[in-house]
């Protein structure tokens, strides 16, 4: 099904995305939770593996679609970070060839050779853009669900487009829908709304073979949810309600930000291609009577309506917007490369690269001690912007094509240097290395009482191999010492070991029955 440009771009994506997957510890929240759920679920036997658990408790947040793959790797091969992230990275990387095939399929009925040539070129450019977007690559490398969700949604749309001429398209659309149901079930409503809007605007009848294919592809997803309801009853609706659709109307766990959060993510992470987005939107509107322009407008509008109104906002929710952005940027990039239109974008990229390199030079002169920045990555990004932007501004098509290649290749090298620098991973809840404290906890007896203060630390729990409850004085065992993970000093407690991580430490607090107050009471 996949043609050569798709395969080549997928291989290029693996080269850019996979190196140094394991040079950083798992981070909270999602990675720590996903790893513990995956391992616990696949450590069960028989049909119990179909139902997700976290440690020994029922896990009702998300279906275990991706957790099965991660759990199989952790229980069979390795529990190292690179192994935990490998499965999600591979599935996320499929978004690139799927986007290429989708864009090519949009203009398949074009009988003109020039039209098909343009379609294939734009499709390849869209794949390169999606591959080199930092948020797409970074979150695609993490043990999280969002990258895989993008791949499943593109499989749904590609199957729908392919279904106009091949019966297998319905099956692919159904399998993509099943994937969504096994990752984030409420999202299926938004993606189906996009698919229905496209079908309605096309005014095209749906064939019986396509419908049957969709039904067959939906069997895995629907069957799992029926089984989940059979096993857990009304608790099975938590992932649809309080952990799903409730995010539209309420703020969960304080993760507010409204529509500004995804917009900031686009502005921060859309480089170097963000300059081409307004021109791409203008192109799509001008060509809204063609399949390509029409679909791109529907996809951008639909995913924006899925993301922007959410009351609960996290940085990776904007992940759904990147395929539409990549398609639109590719349209205007093709216009620049092929016809030399809007060459001001090339000059702007050159100017940005020059400012970046100048800022790097000044920083090296001002600071006596190096700041913790990925200097090699930033330098390569500046060079890519300068060289690529300069040649994109040329009046010769061949030189503009070379400029795009230099920009994409240089940016890819900048990403590789970024992964190697060990500064590529930052999250909301955790800014300290959990593994040293986890090693201290692992050395404790299995019946030792370990608690924590402050926010939960699923990654610490994963490395420590045990569930760590929140500290409560009322549940302390009066006859046994209590170990507390905290960033605060506590009277009467001592460091379990002379080791701290950015203020966090493991304290040992003596048993309550041996404290001076208790001894006095006993006398």
Image: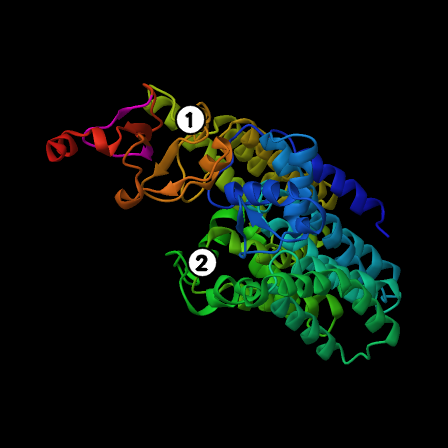
User: Compared with residue 86, is residue 299 higher up or lower down, i.e. above or below?
Assistant: below
Q: How is the image coloured?
A: rainbow
Residue in view at x 66 percent, y 37 percent: 86
The picture places residue 498, in percent across and down from the top left corner, at 32, 18
The local crowd at label 1, few if under 14, some if 14 to 19, many if 20 or more residues have their Cα within 10 Å, is few
The local crowd at label 2, few if under 14, some if 14 to 19, many if 20 or more residues have their Cα within 10 Å, is many
Decide whether residue 492 is among the magenta residues. Answer: yes
Residue designated by label 2: 313
Residue designated by label 1: 361
Apparent side of residue 478 relative to residue 85 in the rendered image (left or right): left
Quadrant in which residue 214 is drawn: bottom right
Element class at badge 1: helix
Decide whether residue 231 is among the magenta residues. Answer: no
Query: Which label belongs to residue 519?
Result: none
Q: Earlier in the sequence, mark 2 or mark 1?
A: 2
| Residue interval drawn in magenta | 483-496
The picture places residue 196, in percent across and down from the top left corner, at 69, 75
Q: Is residue 140 visible?
A: no
Dot 2 and dot 1 residues touching (CB under 8 Å): no
Q: Nearer the viewer, residue 355 or 466?
A: 466
Residue in view at x 51 percent, y 53 percent: 266
| Residues at marks 2 and 1, CA–CA distance in whole angstroms | 37 Å
Q: Is residue 22 visible?
A: yes
The picture places residue 165, in percent across and down from the top left corner, at 88, 67
User: Compared with residue 277, is residue 457 higher up or lower down, i.e. above or below?
Assistant: above
Q: Quadrant of the C terminus?
A: top left
Residue in view at x 62 percent, y 49 percent: 147
Residue in view at x 65 percent, y 48 percent: 66
* Pair 2/1: label in front: 2
Say how many tags the image has: 2
């Amino acid at each position: 099904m996949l043609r050569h440009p798709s395969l080549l771009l997928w291989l290029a994506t693996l080269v850019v995305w996979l190196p140094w997957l394991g040079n950083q510890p798992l981070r909270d929240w999602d990675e720590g939770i996903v790893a513990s759920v995956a391992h616990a679920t696949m450590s069960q036997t028989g049909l119990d593996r179909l139902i997700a658990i976290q440690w020994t408790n029922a896990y009702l947040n998300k279906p275990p679609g991706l957790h099965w793959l991660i759990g199989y790797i952790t229980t069979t091969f390795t529990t190292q970070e690179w192994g935990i992230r490998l499965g999600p990275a591979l599935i996320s990387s499929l978004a690139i060839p799927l986007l290429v095939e989708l864009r090519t399929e949009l203009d398949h009925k074009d009988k003109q050779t020039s039209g098909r040539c343009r379609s294939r070129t734009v499709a390849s450019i869209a794949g390169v853009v999606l591959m080199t977007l930092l948020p797409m690559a970074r979150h695609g490398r993490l043990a999280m669900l969002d990258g895989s969700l993008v791949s499943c949604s593109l499989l749904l749309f590609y199957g729908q487009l392919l279904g106009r001429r091949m019966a297998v398209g319905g099956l692919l659309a159904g399998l993509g829908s099943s994937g969504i149901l096994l990752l984030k079930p409420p999202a299926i409503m938004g993606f189906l709304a996009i698919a229905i809007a496209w079908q309605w605007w096309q005014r095209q009848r749906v064939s019986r073979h396509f419908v049957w294919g969709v039904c067959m592809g939906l069997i895995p997803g629907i069957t799992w949810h029926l089984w989940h309801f059979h096993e857990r009853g009304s608790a099975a609706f938590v992932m649809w309600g309080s952990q799903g659709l409730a995010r539209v109307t309420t703020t969960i766990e304080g993760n507010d930000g409204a529509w500004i959060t995804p917009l900031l993510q686009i502005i921060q992470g859309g480089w170097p291609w963000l300059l081409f987005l307004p021109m791409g939107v203008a192109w799509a509107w001008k060509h809204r009577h063609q399949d390509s322009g029409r679909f791109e407008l529907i996809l951008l509008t639909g995913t924006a309506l899925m993301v922007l109104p959410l009351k609960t906002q996290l940085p990776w929710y904007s992940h759904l917007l990147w395929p539409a952005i990549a398609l639109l940027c590719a349209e205007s990039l093709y216009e620049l490369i092929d016809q030399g239109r809007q060459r001001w974008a090339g000059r702007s990229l050159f100017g940005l690269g020059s400012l970046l390199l100048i800022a790097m030079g000044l920083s090296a002169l001002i600071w006596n001690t190096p700041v913790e920045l990925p200097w090699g990555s930033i330098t390569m990004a500046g060079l890519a912007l300068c060289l690529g932007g300069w040649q994109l501004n040329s009046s010769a098509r061949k030189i503009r094509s070379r400029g795009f290649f230099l920009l994409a290749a240089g940016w890819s090298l900048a990403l590789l240097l970024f992964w190697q620098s060990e500064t590529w991973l930052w999250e909301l809840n955790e800014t300290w290395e959990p593994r040293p404290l986890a090693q201290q906890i692992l050395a404790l007896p299995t019946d030792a009482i370990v608690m924590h203060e402050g926010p939960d630390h699923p990654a610490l729990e994963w490395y420590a191999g045990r569930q760590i409850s929140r500290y409560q004085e009322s549940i302390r065992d009066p006859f046994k010492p209590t170990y507390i993970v905290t960033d605060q000093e506590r009277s009467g407690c001592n460091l379990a070991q002379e080791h701290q991580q950015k203020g966090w430490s493991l304290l040992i607090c003596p048993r309550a029955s041996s404290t001076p107050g208790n001894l006095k009471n006993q006398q």
